[in-house]
Amino acid sequence: MTTPSRLPEPYGQGGGANLADILERVLDKGVVIAGDIRINLLDIELLTIKLRLVVASVDKAKEMGIDWWESDPALSSRARRDELARENAELRERLARLEELEPSRAREEAP
Amino acid sequence: MTGLRYVYAVCRPFGTPLQAQLTGVGGDPPRLVPHHGLVAVVSHVPEADFAEEPLRAHLEDLDWLTGVARAHQGVIDALTTVTTPLPLRLGTVFRDDSGVRTMIEAREESFLRTLERLEGRVEWGVKVYVEPERPTDAPAEPAAKPASGRDYLRQRRMRTKAQDDLWQRAETFATRLHETLSECAEDSRLHAPQNPALSGAAGRNVLNAAYLVPRAESEEFVERVDRTKDGAPGIRVELTGPWAAYSFAGEETAGEEGA
């Protein structure tokens, strides 16, 4: 028998609770028991799509550049590398154009 | 129409009645099915909605799913105020009370072990966001086209550096916060970051963690989180709870159902 002690006022819950928080918990956490009506949530097409929305898979998270929880001190993510590669290409292009315009000055100032 | 049994949670028997006006999935008030020193909390739900075929179809409907998820969480929440519930995953449905009792019997030991472990504890959720990038904060630098390749490069470097610095700070901040909070929690889980499409939160979620904290120490935990909220420009900390110990309930049964 529990007699709960006073709890702080709830934060970010009740009617206004973030749907992602609720779905994350009721769909993905808690005890999994196969009832008489057997529905494997993972088989449900829309749900898997939505779940990926709610709870980005770790792979997805990595793509998004969030992999620090693997105690990797560097944010070494494909997404950011792609960004750098794009930026690099853009810079090369600009630099090339610059060199066409002012070959001597551009060479002096190129990093 | 015969009703099916939608099971929210399993608890130890508790004396305090649930709020009289509490409604669960489909508007049915939660009922108790006591068995073997445990209690299942159930609603009667129509077969037309919760038999295998209709349930499968309904689960494809995000609005329907949202209603059921909120009702499910509402019941778990009400239970959390009077006892320590062991929340089951959404959509756990049995034909009748006898099916529910059979399930309790089959898992009695594991339920009791987990309830023992979670007794008197709640879950707090802590998320860290990197605030969305504001249009260039650099003073006196209108977002006009750069005058020269050199200006362009300088602007680009400044922007990239500012963004990198913010990421670096957010990462350091989140890592340190998680270490601090883990120290004053009994257990913790790191969840995958949430996609803003459903959470509606601004900024990018870089930490999504859950902490298992005794009720009696919750106020202290909340204060500790509150103290970290200031002094980190561009970084936002969000606290939710108290939740039932959703993130810590599954270990006993993990892997048994091939989920």
Image: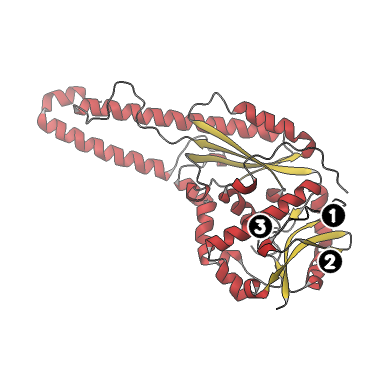
- Lower position in the chain sequence, tag 2 or tag 3: 3
Element carrying mark 1: loop
Give residue B71's mark. 3
Q: How is the image coloured?
A: secondary structure
Residue type at tag 2? Glu
Element carrying mark 2: helix
Element carrying mark 3: helix
Q: Eyeballing the image, is B228 above or below A14?
A: above
Q: Residue at image x 33%, y 21%? A: B139
Give residue B12's mark. 1
Label 1 marks which chain's residue? B
Q: Is circle 2 on the same chain as circle 3? A: yes
Label 2 marks which chain's residue? B
Residue nearer the viewer, A51 or B160: A51
Badge 2 vs badge 3, beta-carbon distance below 8 Å: no
Image coordinates of residue B18 in percent, x first then y, are 79, 53
For label 2, the crowd category at 10 Å Cα-Cα, with few meaning under 14, some 14 to 19 and many 20 or more, is: some
Front position among marks 1 and 3: 3
Image coordinates of residue B135 in percent, x first then y, are 35, 32
Q: CA distance from mark 1 to mark 3?
A: 21 Å
Left or right placement of residue B248 versus residue A82 in this view: right
Q: CA distance from mark 2 to mark 3?
A: 26 Å
Give residue B130's mark. none
Label 3 marks which chain's residue? B
Which quadrant, please, contains the N terminus of chain B? bottom right
Q: Quadrant of residue B99?
A: bottom right
Q: CA distance from mark 2 to mark 1?
A: 14 Å
